[in-house]
Image (cartoon, rainbow, N blue to C red):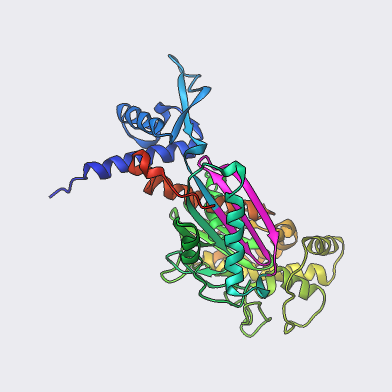
Amino acid sequence: MSVGIRHDDLRKRNRAMVISAVRRAGQVSRTDIAATTGLSHSTISAISADLIAEGILTEAKGAEAGAARRGRPQVAIGLNPEAAAVVAIVLLFNFLSVAVVDFSGRVIVEERRKLSTFDLSEDELVGECIAMVRRQTARREVAGRDVLRIVLAVQGTTDAVGREMLWSPITAHEGVDFGGRLEKAFGVPVTVENDCNMIAVALRWHDPDRYRDDFIAILLSHGIGMGLVLKGDLFTGTHSSGGEFGHMVHRPDGALCRCGRRGCVEAYAGNYAIWRSASGASEDEAPISDISVDDMARLAVSARDHDGPEREAYQKAGEALGYGLGSLFALIDPAPVAMVGIGAAAFDLIEPSLRATIGLTAGGQHSKAISFATYADELPLITLGCAMRALTFIDTEVLAVGGQTAARGKDVA
């Protein structure tokens, strides 16, 4: 027996498809939306008219879509930037940023600051996030906009439902309920995500041709992290955010890792590990809490200039990453890899040993098919991932419902 689709569910699905098509294209004609979604022209016309009337979409003044086609040029439609706003919070080691993003995905206002995350109490850590959100949402540029969702990306492991930071190397506190406490402060839904997962989300929007069904994002920074997309879906665990690539064991009982265990990939490939190795320090030495971007840049210059412990340190990092990726590629087919973060600026020093090591593993049978791209600054990608996570939720779960009241949020200032 066939099961029918309720009219309300069908309407919601079709509206979500139209909004999604416009978000992907930026400015697009109704004909192109029909081609993308498979919906009829009459359905597209009706839905777009409703969405324009509700202030969700807008006709682009003076813009034409499909002008190269024969016949009457079509007016392009796009997202109304003022239809909604979202907040993207990024909490990393000794760093916090908050960006308010409009409905079109443009950053309206942003604040970044250094803070000593490990020295803050749990209340102070959450309080810093709340205070920065209040400052940014109170700014004149944000006035009158409905903030409908907040997404916080944190360096570390989060729970599978996106509520808590379970563990993080940036603080001694565990099980921090960022989701509940931010929701209580601002009265809007909050999702807590792993930072590398948000990098993966961002890459799909940044370069959808390269990052589509299967790809890997590796963060090369003070720590090592991974965002993994398989068959078009972001991989997460059943209990946590998953993807703790940096804390896979590279050498049992090996170098001391920042997490307190030994032999992790990060203990050889993180900034602190490369610095420790290059300086000739013992692998038992506690990781340095922070190393500046300038210091790492100078270390890379020395490694390029001559043979020595600096170059060897980067080679060891490549080996650790190579064995880890090779083991992963033994389970899945080779896929595009994005190397992100300050370590990506020195990828030329890492890549030779990384590729050679992958070739020694079972996953290296097709190593020539593995391609790498580098992005030296992770913050814009993490912020974009948070924003798109929030905006796509609004597209499908709030504005797709229909009606002007569905779009009304709360003034979080």
Residue 376 x, y percent position in the rendering: 69, 54
Please identify the quarter of the rendering in which residue 8 is found.
top left
In this view of the protein, can residue 332 be seen by the observer? no
187 vs 278, nearest the viewer: 187
Total numbered circles? 0
In the image, what residue occupies the spot 40% across and 26% down?
31
Q: Main secondary structure of the magenta part?
A: strand
- Would you say 275 lies left or right of 386 here? right
In the image, what residue occupies the spot 44% across and 33% down?
57
Q: Is residue 29 magenta?
A: no
Please identify the quarter of the rendering in which residue 55 is found.
top left
Residue 15 x, y percent position in the rendering: 35, 39
Residue 215 x, y percent position in the rendering: 53, 55
Q: Is residue 102 magenta?
A: yes
- Looking at the image, which residue sits at the far top? 71
- Would you say 289 lies left or right of 103 here? right
407 vs 347, nearest the viewer: 407
189 vs 310, nearest the viewer: 189
Please identify the quarter of the rendering in which residue 143 is found.
top right
- Would you say 245 lies left or right of 288 here? left
Residue 316 x, y percent position in the rendering: 72, 71
In this view of the protein, can residue 139 be seen by the observer? yes
Q: Which residues are magenta?
A: 88-116
In the image, what residue occupies the spot 46% across and 63% down?
184
In the image, what residue occupies the spot 43% across and 55% down?
231
Vertical placement of residue 102 versus 136, above or below: above
